[in-house]
Amino acid sequence: MSSKSTKQVSLPVLTNSKARHKFLLGEKFEAGIVLTGTEVKSIRAGNAQISESFARFVKDELFLFNVHIAEYEHGGEENHPPQRSRKLLLKRRELSKLKAEVEAAGKSLVPLRIYFKDALIKCQIAVGTGKNHRDKRQDLKKRVAQREADQALKNSLKR
């Protein structure tokens, strides 16, 4: 009998590391993204960045801005512009809920990560409220205290 070898290809997950530092995050949503073929190939190669990106409503549609997806090296004339706006796909009920929350409370829509789900590329977005300098310092103090407590516990277990 012949056995088929199955290759496990690890697909990249793009994360926005600055999002948790700059925003207090609320409810999260999973959205599809409208992409061209060369953009998908470039994301598969890991040539994309979402650290400074944001989502915004244009009329009644949600778009993702400032996502940098590098041009595909074998794309030729069909290559995409690296920083174009990309449409996000959500259900109408979710879109109206997000739009009402953003307009009423003055919150922001922050992309947290872009990942592969089966053969599709999805974007996880969250409703965020901007942190001020004091909030950022308090988060830093909590992390330092937690790190010191973990270190003390680790040292006491060694003895």
Image (tube, rainbow, N blue to C red):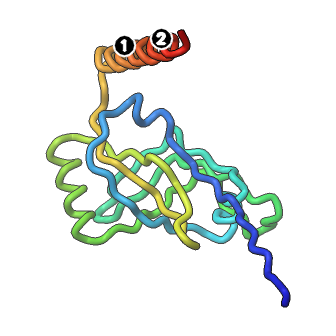
**Apparent side of residue 55 relative to residue 24 in the rendered image (left or right):** right
Q: Is 118 placed above or below 142 here?
A: below
Residue in view at x 64 percent, y 49 percent:
48
For this view, does 129 lie left or right of residue 150?
A: left
Spatial distance from mark 2 to mark 1, Cα to Cα? 22 Å
| Residue 109 drawn at (x, y percent) | 34, 47
Quarter-of-image position of residue 10: bottom right
Q: Which residue is mark 2?
A: 156
Can you identify the residue that label 1 sits on?
141
Residue 110 in the image: x percent, y percent? 39, 45
On the rendered structure, is 105 left or right of 133?
Answer: left
Residue in the foreground of this view, choosing between 61 and 12: 12
Q: Choose the circle earlier in sequence order: 2 or 1.
A: 1
Q: Of the residues shown, which amino acid type is indicated by label 2?
A: Ser
Residue in the image at 53% along x and 9% along y? 159
Residue depth check, mark 2 versus mark 1: number of the one nearer the observer: 2
What SS does tag 2 mark? Answer: helix
| Left or right: where 25 falls relative to 115 | left
Look at the picture and state if 37 lies above or below 19.
Answer: below
Residue 15 location (% of width, % of height) = 53, 44
Mark 1 Cα-neighbour bin, 10 Å: few <14, some 14–19, many ≥20: few
Percent of width and height locating residue 62: 36, 60
Between 125 and 8, the one lying in front of the other is 8
Q: Residue at x 42, y 45 (%)?
A: 54
In what element is the residue under mark 1?
Answer: helix
Name the quadrant containing residue 50: top right
Extreme residue in the left direction:
104
Q: Which amino acid does the dot numbered 1 rest on? A: Lys
Residue at x 71%, y 63% (from the top left corner):
9
* Mark 2 neighbour class, 10 Å CA radius: few under 14, some 14 to 19, many 20 or more: few
Classify the position of the N terminus by image quarter. bottom right
Compared to 33, does 85 lie above or below?
above
